[in-house]
Amino acid sequence: MARIKREQLEEHLVEKQFNYLDLTILDALFTPDWKEKWTLTQKQHDDWEKYCMSTLKKVLKINKSKAAYNFKYLKKNFGLKIK
């Protein structure tokens, strides 16, 4: 897998979330109410959170608490509801 750059990080993590539903960011662009329509299972959400935390720590070179803070931002603005 290619190295993820800081500039692409947010898009990459949101895309990863959509991949659990076999969707892409492009699908979200053509579905204005995607945040209300699409949901993740608890397991999918937990897997996505685990992936995000490790990726945030690795790419941004930050500790766990700062990664958790960044994940909260990501989840609040781009996170899908849990079934």
Image (spheres, rainbow, N blue to C red):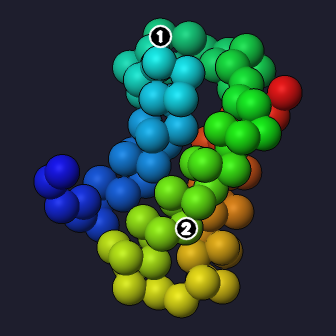
Dot 2 falls on a residue whose secondary structure is helix
Query: Which of the two discs, 1 and 2, labels the residue nearer the N terminus?
Result: 1
**Dot 1, how many residues are within 10 Å of its Cα: few (below 14), some (14-19), or many (20+)?**
few
The label shown at residue 73 is: none
Please tell me which residue is depicted at 69% across the width and 19% down the height of the picture: 38
> In the shown orientation, is residue 78 left or right of residue 76?
left
**Dot 2, how many residues are within 10 Å of its Cα: few (below 14), some (14-19), or many (20+)?**
many
Dot 1 falls on a residue whose secondary structure is loop
Look at the image and tell me whether residue 79 can be seen: yes
Please tell me whether mark 1 or mark 2 is closer to you in this view: 2
Q: Position of residue 51 (x, y in %)?
A: 51, 57
Is the C terminus in the top left, top right, bottom left or bottom right quadrant? top right
Q: Quadrant of residue 65?
A: bottom right
Q: Is residue 18 above or below residue 49?
A: above
Please tell me which residue is depicted at 66% across the width and 73% down the height of the picture: 68
**CA–CA distance in space, label 1 to label 2:** 28 Å
Which is nearer the eye, 43 or 2?
A: 43
- Asked whether the beta carbons under mark 1 and mark 2 sit within 8 Å of each other, the answer is no
Q: Is residue 9 above or below residue 80?
A: below
Q: Position of residue 59 (x, y in %)?
A: 34, 73
Q: Residue furthest front?
A: 43
Residue marked by disc 2: 53
Name the amino acid, label 1.
Answer: Phe
Name the amino acid, label 2.
Answer: Met
Residue marked by disc 1: 30
Give the tally of numbered discs.
Answer: 2
Please tell me which residue is depicted at 45% across the width and 78% down the height of the picture: 57
